[in-house]
Image: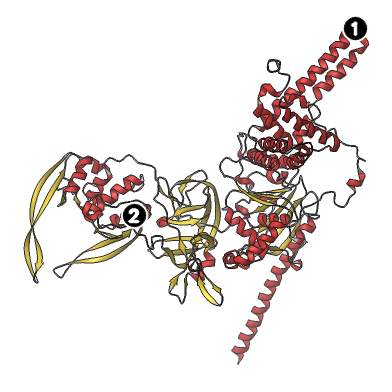
Amino acid sequence: MSNSKKTDFNFLGKDFQVRLLFQILTDRKFADSIMDIMDANYFEDEFFRKIAITIKSAYEKHESIPDISSLEMRLMDGAKDDIQRDFILRQLRHVKEAEANDADWVQERALKFCKQQELKKSVKEIQEIIDRGDIDDYDKCEDILKRALETGEGKDDGIDVFHDMDSVLADDFRKPIPTGIKGLDDCMDGGLSKGELAVILAPFGVGKAQPLTSKLLTPNGWTTMGDIKEGDSVIGRNGKETKVIGTYPQGIRPIYKVMFNDGTETLCDAEHLWSVNTIDQRNRKTKKNGKVVYLESDNSYKTMRTIDMVDNVKVWGNSRLNFKVPIVSPVEFTKQELIIDPYLLGVILGDGCITTSNQPHFVTKDSEIIESVRSVYNNITVKEQVREIEKEVNDELVLVKHHLTKVSLLGIKSNLIELGLYGTNSKSKSIPNQYLYTSVDDRVKLLQGLVDIDGYIDGHRIEISTTSKELSTGIKELVLSLGGRVSIGEKIGEYNNIECSLYYRISFSLPNNGIIPSKLSRKIKKFNSRVKYSENKFINSIEYYGEEDAQCIMVDDEEHLYVTDDYIVTHNTTMITKVANTAKEKGNNVLQIFFEDNPKVIQRKHLACWSNINLNDLIYHKDELNKIVETKSAEKGELRLKKFPSDGTTIPHIKQYIRKQIARGFRPDIVLIDYIDCVQSNKVFKDSWDAEGNVMRQFETMLDELDMAGWTAVQGNRSSIGAETVDSTMIGGSIKKGQIGHFIVSIAKTLDQKESGHANIAILKSRFGKDGIIFNDAIFDNGTMEIRIVEDNGGKTFMESKKDKESGSQKKVNNLLDAAKERQKVLEKADNT
């Protein structure tokens, strides 16, 4: 049987044969290495054999592998009827949708099998020569064996220096894909061609920063921006753990204090990004037949810089707050081992006596509370008490008997000592950290204990009063971590017109997220979760705070949001998008790969490129944009966006994805990866810099094998931040990334340029055009996606630019000296008169 003799691919299975055909159709280099030694008869399935014959025929005639569409047309030409055509389409669908994983293994097995068959044929031929017994034929046997061993190594034997001179001397031998940035394209001799790799170098995340003292929430509680490091975990807006995949020191930055309508606040720099919902989104309207028509509210969030919000915090005659921010979901902290049940601790903190002069106890009139405590701690004694309290009746104070129950907690003293609570009184109680940063279930029980023993519920409004400032801030933290809104008021108590102690009133509400803040039936009946305005957390003011050392982080979360001071949710690709957009405009197939942004953000950026409408204003131009979309969709070339996870994606993963797209009829002319630092090596290296170099080399190889042009971005190191010109020594991580790139362009922005929408663009390296060129003050508008080099301000060598800068600096000095001399003359003249 063929299976036992292994004379065809059948012993490897049908699935293997489908995957092999897929690899041949999508990997040019592999196809070149196997086509001459692969026999179509190795495919036992008749239709697979027909596909292989069709591919080999096209390869032998045109020296190229047909794509799926071309293959389909060739096979359809031979179909006799609709039944055959339907069969062809179904079988081709299997090939198109073949599993792309383990591509190297499929290719290796197929090559070994085909080479083995070639060796088998050669051995048979050699044996026939040996059987003839002619010693002079030995050299012939050696040549046959050498040829057999060299099969399957591809056809790259080099070329004669004078080969195909017409093509070599053609004007379009590179067929470059332009960037759309004129000065840049001039230096690149038209743009980037297939097989070439371009790198954008810029200080990553410049400006999206918070002071090193800002608090960041982690699964185990709070840390600071200064203490956070790559690989640590923080809490995202959804309340779940997310990894920090990058930390980027920003140096001394101007810092702003952002305050909210619920009394919470945080610090950040001017360029820090926020996810906000604006008043115009919530109050959408248009005109129809001359009348104002109100539209459905847009409740989505968009990204804005702190500096862009400063002057628009309050609108509509300073009467309405503009920017709403998202509320954090209940935070899923790591569950802690708790030595006292959280509900019981809530009761103790709310109205318990744990001073050293008494046995720990609490007093209540509610039997339900006693039973709830007994269910979690049964070492108690219960004693009925009658107290006489003063009560106002008909404008007179009278003594009224009040029936209560004293519940003594036996054997709990040591646990209270361990928690640091034993011996505290009503003014010094606080919530231990392990109870604030534990599971949602534990924190809800703690809140229920506090509310049951000492809380007031009226609909969605809940109040707890305490004379302990520490306890009040702990309750605030507890409520915020459960997704609630909270405020604290201070008041001096009064009894019989006599001032008493200062106390704190904690007022809060909870959204409709399933959390019930009480176990007590009479209080539950009064409770309603907040529905209206439950998400209404607004920026109330933004004020300049001062200058501080700052840092930004990137988190592995789809929204790139993390939780900072007071449980405030805050946020974490202009040139890449511009290049991708231009490539599509020129009729190319474009694949834009990214890791950070939401796909809708990238889509909006492309719409801004085509329309020249600011990103923030797109929503008001839907009719105009729909016409643009209709026009662009009909034009040649396709632009596809693909988001990959930033944890675990490798170049082989990306290559498999592209192969799949090629098999389905979409062959990219250019691929853009934003950014290469998010791609991980599929090999283990002792030095992380070696791994980075390996990733870039794999990307370069992929471009050659799949015949594509490639752009990517890399981050600069700390010295690149604030630099007027970013040079190649400022590449973050491995310098190999720069060495491997065929073309490197850098972008630098001073603080003044950020404000004015300009940048300095420098060409650091070029294998096919000019380098060492700098374009000063190029237009770089992140809002409209406009990148334009102003002819009067660029195109100079680094040395010319340096001289101009020195000349400009000297001119400023001279002007200052001249002004000082003029002022001195004026003063002297005034003295003389």
Quadrant where the C terminus lies?
Answer: bottom right
Q: Looking at the image, which is closer to me, 593 or 37?
A: 37
Q: Distance between the residues labelled 1 and 2?
A: 96 Å
Q: Is residue 792 above or below residue 688?
A: below
Left or right placement of residue 800 versus residue 257 in this view: right
Q: Residue at x 8, y 71 (%)?
A: 394
The picture quadrant where one finds residue 121 is top right
Residue 690 falls in image quadrant:
top right
Residue 205 seen from this side: no
Q: Is mark 2 on a helix, strand or loop?
A: helix
Q: Kindly report which numbered mark, 1 or 2, lies closer to the viewer in this rendering.
A: 1
**Vertical arrangement, residue 143 with respect to residue 774, above or below:** above
x, y percent for residue 134: 92, 8
- In the figure, is residue 599 to the left or right of 767? left
**440 lies left or right of 655:** left
Residue where numbered disc 1 is placed = 133
Residue in the image at 84% along x and 22% along y: 147
The local crowd at label 2, few if under 14, some if 14 to 19, many if 20 or more residues have their Cα within 10 Å, is many
Q: Is residue 147 visible?
A: yes
Q: Any mark on residue 479, and which?
A: 2
Q: Which three-letter amino acid code belongs to the residue tagged 2?
A: Val
